[in-house]
Amino acid sequence: MTRVETANGQPSAPLDVVCVGETMAMVTPTPGGRLDAESTFVLRAGGAESNVAMFLAALGHRVGWAGRVGADPLGDLVVGQVRATGVDTSLVEIDPSHPTAVYLKDPGPDGTRVYYYRRDSAAAGMDLAYAARVDAVPAAVLHLSGVTPALSASCRSLVEHLISSRPAGRRLVSFDVNHRPALWPDRSTAGTELLRLAQAADVVFVGLDEAARLWDVEQPEQVRALVDRPGTVVVKNGALDVTAFSADGVTVEPARPVDVVEPVGAGDAFAAGWLSGALRGLDAAARLRLGHLVAGAALGSVSDFAELPPVDSICAELGITPDAWHRPVGPA
């Protein structure tokens, strides 16, 4: 059995959100560079769930990231950078027997290719015992993604347990489909498993492009017809718009025009913005606008995380007052 060490054991106070999943060390060229010997590079933490956690912390929420890293300098870097943004990392486990995973970005004229080095990583060892630690944390929202169940059988068990169990104090489960084709043995397995997990969640985020790959659908309405159990389904249609299906009806919000430096991580940023809006009790359209605003910041950054505009600017974009922004947040 792998021996693991924890930083502090448990968060010292209840959280608005706890995000569970893998975070890797990310290597990316500075703007204009490629994955070659002539470029300079930036080393940052990168992972779907910790990206969401970092943006939520920047938006003023009490948020924790739960994951596992190796007892190596890259693990120290990952945990230190996530913690530096205001995210609670007391649930992070340190595995001395397996390494922190790494991925490298290679931007090009036809898009960014990503190369992953994560086989037998520390994060792949997350399991049901770890799920029990997460269950013990009071949080209004639990956020998961489809990356984690693809890492290993034990990670799939972890996600299945967390997404189906609702301990006291946890009010909402958020699931980003986040289909990564390279992690799944075949499209059929991915489609079946990710649909099953999505159906068990309360809020689901999915890109129309990945829904087309997974489930052979073409329109947001077809996604909703298929993912029909969650209370809210948010379908992202690239640079065009986002459609949310909820008890409030159907809400469509056009995307904001932005200069794109690097697209990876924008979906995580959108999820963080939407969840922040939900926790603040904003209406359906304002939640989508906040998602677009946070995603726009990520699109303009070489790394997955980026500085957000001042609160006054955010409030102006959303059409709310700073007093409304700063009022206590509650369950989504």
Image (cartoon, helix red, strand yellow):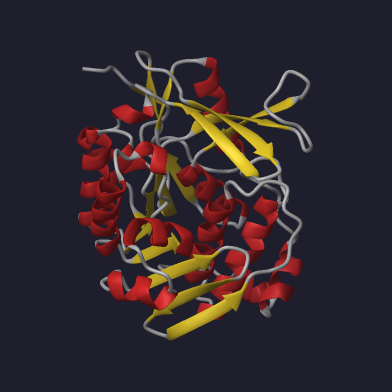
The N terminus - image quarter: top left
State the image coordinates of residue 284 (x, y, percent, origin top left): 50, 79
**Residue displayed at 42% across by 70% down:** 218
State the image coordinates of residue 110 (x, y, percent, origin top left): 66, 45
So how many labels did they put on this image? 0
85 or 204: nearer the eye?
204
Report whether residue 35 is seen.
Answer: yes
Reply above or below: 89 against 226. above
Reply above or below: 57 against 70. below
- Say whether residue 87 is left or right of residue 95: right
Report whether residue 21 is seen.
Answer: no
31 or 309: nearer the eye?
31
10 or 22: nearer the eye?
22
**Residue displayed at 38% across by 63% down:** 204
State the image coordinates of residue 157 (x, y, percent, origin top left): 21, 41
- Say whether residue 146 is left or right of residue 304: left
Q: Tell me the quarter of the picture where residue 302 sits.
A: top right
Reply above or below: 7 against 14. above
The C terminus - image quarter: bottom left
